[in-house]
Amino acid sequence: MSDYHRCSACRDGQAFPLPLGMAFQPIVDVRQQRIFAHEALVRGANGESAGSLLEQINESNRYAFDQACRVQAVEWAARLQVPALVSINFMPNAVYRAETCIRTTLEAAKRCNLALDKIIFEVTEQEQVLDIDHLVGILRAYRQQGFRTAIDDFGAGYAGLNLLADFQPDLLKLDMQLIRGVDQDTVRQVLVDSTLQMCRRLGIQVIAEGVETLAELHVLRELGVELFQGYLLARPGFACLPEVHWPD
């Protein structure tokens, strides 16, 4: 598909045909017992799973879906008066020209009075990116606009250290498969510790996602992790900000 046709959706304002909703899951600083951010997670209009929506995404509607998710995340964050940062996932393969495709997000943020430096754009390593240079260009363009950036599922996907060599995000989320059972696995502990040391030197904050047990959390805290996300602390709340269960 040519760039002309790919960008026509942006010019023509084509909308995603299905109604969307949003759930929010907190990312917390356990030591300070404060909410660092809320991640906006797409759902169906009545709370249907993200998977049920993603099954219907293809080349023809990927752009419209990505744009609709961004706008919904901004609007719901403003409606719920999110007191911290807002993390919004984006699909890099749906972004054809970063400076153009960000336009609807900028308009939504202005309309909802949401400061750009309160928004984190989070890219998952689980989506196969066809052009790493293109992704780096997107992340740099978003940073120039004033957004924060994050790499999700680090260690599970397509780029890993190669991506970090070209772009250092503000935040890096350790993949939950690396976190699962870390309290009983010295190899995982070594990998987490090494990643933390690397990120400290690069000025990148680390989030441990998918934390489900106190044992996992305690070991990760001992290793130096400060930011956490997972069912142990709070499950996603559909159209609401869920209460955090602070560990002892």
Image (spheres, rainbow, N blue to C red):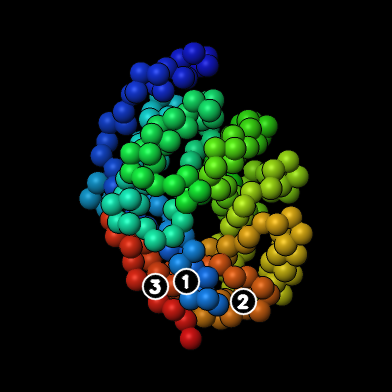
Q: Earlier in the sequence, mark 3 or mark 1?
A: 1
Q: Mark 3 falls on what kind of element?
A: loop
Residues tagged 2 and 3 counted as in contact (Cβ below 8 A): no
- Give the residue type at disc 1: Arg
The residue under the point 47% across, 19% down is 6
Q: Secondary structure at mark 1?
A: strand
Residue found at x 55% / y 48%: 148
Residue identifier under label 3? 244
Q: Relative to residue 69, is residue 228 drawn left or right?
A: right
**Badge 1 density bin: few <14, some 14–19, many ≥20, Cα 10 Å:** some
Which label lies toward us, 3 or 1? Answer: 1
Identify the residue under disc 2: 221
The answer to whether one can see residue 219 in this image is yes
Q: Position of residue 192 (x, y in %)?
A: 69, 66
Q: Is residue 147 left or right of residue 73?
A: right
Q: What x and y, as percent, mark residue 36?
A: 49, 64
Where residue 98 appears, as percent x and y from the top left, is 54, 29
158 and 194: which is toward the camera: 194
As shown in the figure, which amino acid type bears the numbered disc 2?
Arg
Image-based side of 201 in relation to 138, left or right: right
Q: Against 125, is 107 above or below?
A: above
Q: Which residue is mark 1?
A: 34
